[in-house]
Image (tube, grey):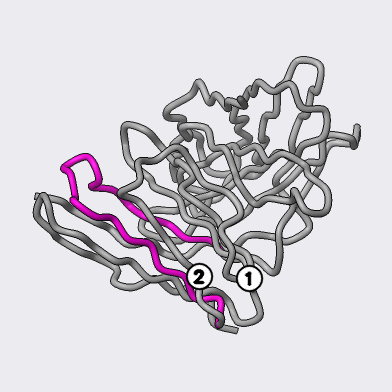
Amino acid sequence: KAGVTQTPRYLIKTRGQQVTLSCSPISGHRSVSWYQQTPGQGLQFLFEYFSETQRNKGNFPGRFSGRQFSNSRSEMNVSTLELGDSALYLCASSLGLGVRSEQFFGPGTRLTVL
Amino acid sequence: AQTVTQSQPEMSVQEAETVTLSCTYDTSENNYYLFWYKQPPSRQMILVIRQEAYKQQNATENRFSVNFQKAAKSFSLKISDSQLGDTAMYFCAFMKHENYGGATNKLIFGTGTLLAVQP
């Protein structure tokens, strides 16, 4: 069974641009969560989706948004990029919500904002 | 709000030795779960072990075991017979337990401990 895939793996953008990151969950998984990983702030929760509905959102500005499609694939978008948005963005998928559904992480998308 | 603290930014251990990574957390919740995740260099994060707060028995997974002290809000990870492949960043994480419509996968992570296993 294929694991969680994230595309692209690496991305370089300039300040003010926008970016879209994609996450394809493991087949059959209906939940996707997103995290931002930086050396300074560590791993921070962005949002989670289940069956196309955003169930929870972290403390990030409105420039960060996401969605989930009917095939459970998820995208996150960051508009008006800032230097501080440079980070590794991880997504995790699981069958459902709650601890009984183990979360599996993707390899991440490394975003560099110049 | 919940917080997770890992006070050891880096640790080193000799191959075949035992090492313990520390984690403390703060929460007013009574039902929750605790996890240790491993993130090897340039590789995906994987679950090492998890503990349900209502269970007094400490979780074990092969060479990995935890020491869960609920009253002290402490959750340490012990790695026995350390192997070179254990070299990684280890994250302690917290998840609230919610039933039914409130269930969530939101993890609150500590800042991580970089473990180096020396040959």
**Label 2 is found on which chain of the structure?**
A
Callout 1, which amino acid? Ser
Residue lying at 37% horizontally and 55% vertically, measured from the top left? A89
The picture quadrant where one finds residue B97 is top right
Q: CA distance from mark 1 to mark 2?
A: 7 Å
**Label 1 is found on which chain of the structure?**
A
Report the side of B87 relative to A62 (left or right). Answer: right
Q: Which residue is the site of mark 2? A: A68
Q: Is label 1 in contact with label 2 (beta carbons under 8 Å)?
A: yes
| Pick the front one: B78 or B16 | B78
**Magenta-drawn stretch contains A74:** yes
Residue A31 lies, with reference to residue B46, above or below; the image says below
In magenta, the rendered stretch is: A71-92
Q: Please give the label number shown on residue B53.
A: none
Q: Are marks 1 and 2 on the same chain?
A: yes
Residue lying at 56% horizontally and 80% vertically, measured from the top left? A70
User: SS for tag 2?
Assistant: strand
Report the side of B23 relative to A4 (left or right). Answer: right
Report the side of B96 relative to A7 (left or right). Answer: right
Percent across and percent down for residue A102 are 69, 60
Residue lying at 48% horizontally and 76% vertically, measured from the top left? A24
Q: Please give the label number shown on residue A51.
A: 1
Task: Give the mark nearest the N terminus, 1 or 2.
Answer: 1
Residue B101 lies, with reference to residue A3, above or below; the image says above
Callout 2, which amino acid? Gln
